[in-house]
Image: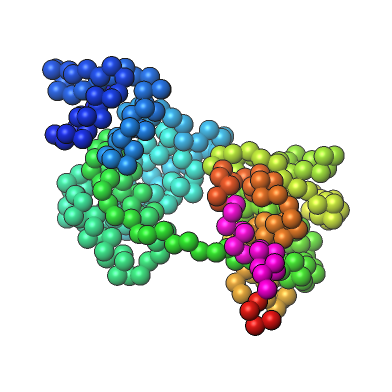
Amino acid sequence: MIGIQFTQDKLIQNLIKGLPDPRWSSKYHMAYINNTKKNLGIIFNTFKGVVWINYNKFLSNRPINTNNEIVDVQWFRERKTPKDYRVCPEEYLLKLELKKYANSTVKTYVNFFEMFINHFKNKDITTLNESDVRSYLQKLIRRNVSNSYLNQTINAIKFYYETVLGMPNRFYDLERPRKVHKLPTVISKEEVIAMLNCTTNLKHKCILALLYSAGLRRSELLNLKIKDIDSKRMLIYIKCGKGNKDRLTLLSETVLKDLRLYFKEWNPKEFLFEGRKGSKYSAASVIQIVKQAADKAGILQKVTPHTLRHSFATHLLESNVDLRQIQVLLGHGSSKTTEIYTHVATNTFKSIKNLLD
């Protein structure tokens, strides 16, 4: 059954009467209806915008990540920490491990939660309340940290109290910073070509060319394996991209020629781009390659690997490629995410005659 427990409220009582065959349990002192997928959906639609609903008990077995990445939390257990440093509780690490969160998420959650619990060294962490969390967030705001930093802190704290300890009502009312809607940073095609022409290292040139010509995220580039390059169909197979989604994207003929030369020279074994001893290439190295190429090309604005992905999408849109096709190539789950590029594509403005001209 789906139990519906709530504080006395006439609006909620009336809405419950409209649910399929609602009944009252004298034993548990709550209303309830049959537990079906359809009824869960009806409850969501009925109470959406009216109350906060705790679905934890019904969705607790939903897999977070189904790829084959090995979740490494042992590193946190074995590391050396300063004296009197409060480490993350074992049950926190275990829950992250069982839910198979990505390693990057594990590191983020543990680091942010440990900063929080070390702020309250003299308090039992199970006794901390919303007031304590708010005072800690206020301290971070005074340090002028980013909205992303604040949200990651809230997520790490909520994970412990709501997911690990199963206290879902504890911090659901925390205020989050208002979302900032920033336009993507884009450089011109000429500037991209200048970056490639300034790069003499073949490996570095292939990295730059793939980031731009295939619209890859940095993590997707680093996870590329030799078998993911399909030269017969001229496609690149992205496995377990953001959101754990597979997709296909474009393989440039020009890039393929350089990749063949690179392969003969570097002879990678598993990953397309490998570091020392055949390990995955360093994320920091990719950032440095892009930065150096932009500096050599004389580009004044800051250029990151994601700038090349933004530029790929924008230049496709400027070439009148359908927005839906761009969405598929980028691996966006929603067309609304892709629509941001309409705000920076030049053909949006070329059709408008400037008032001074």
- The stretch in magenta equals 338-353
**Left or right side of 309 for 266:** right
Instruction: Point out the image quarter for the C terminus.
Output: bottom right
**Left or right side of 27 for 81:** right
Residue 167, image quadrant: top left
User: What residue is rendered at 80% in x and 69% in y?
Assistant: 197
The mark tally for this picture is 0
Instruction: Point out the image quarter for the N terminus.
Output: top left
Residue toward you, 96 or 195:
195
Is 352 in the magenta?
yes
Q: Is residue 166 above or below residue 342?
A: above
Q: Can residue 289 be spotted in the picture?
A: no
Image location (x, y in percent) of residue 251:
78, 48
Q: Can residue 340 be spotted in the picture?
A: yes
User: What residue is rendered at 43% in x and 35% in y?
Assistant: 99
Image location (x, y in percent) of residue 180:
44, 62
User: What residue is rendered at 24% in x and 40% in y?
Assistant: 169
**Left or right side of 342 for 191:** right
Residue toward you, 279 or 217:
217
User: What residue is rendered at 31% in x and 35% in y?
Assistant: 47
Image location (x, y in percent) of residue 270:
71, 42
Is 354 in the magenta?
no
* Secondary structure predominantly adopted by residues drawn in magenta: helix
**Left or right side of 204 for 32:** left
Image location (x, y in percent) of residue 188:
71, 69
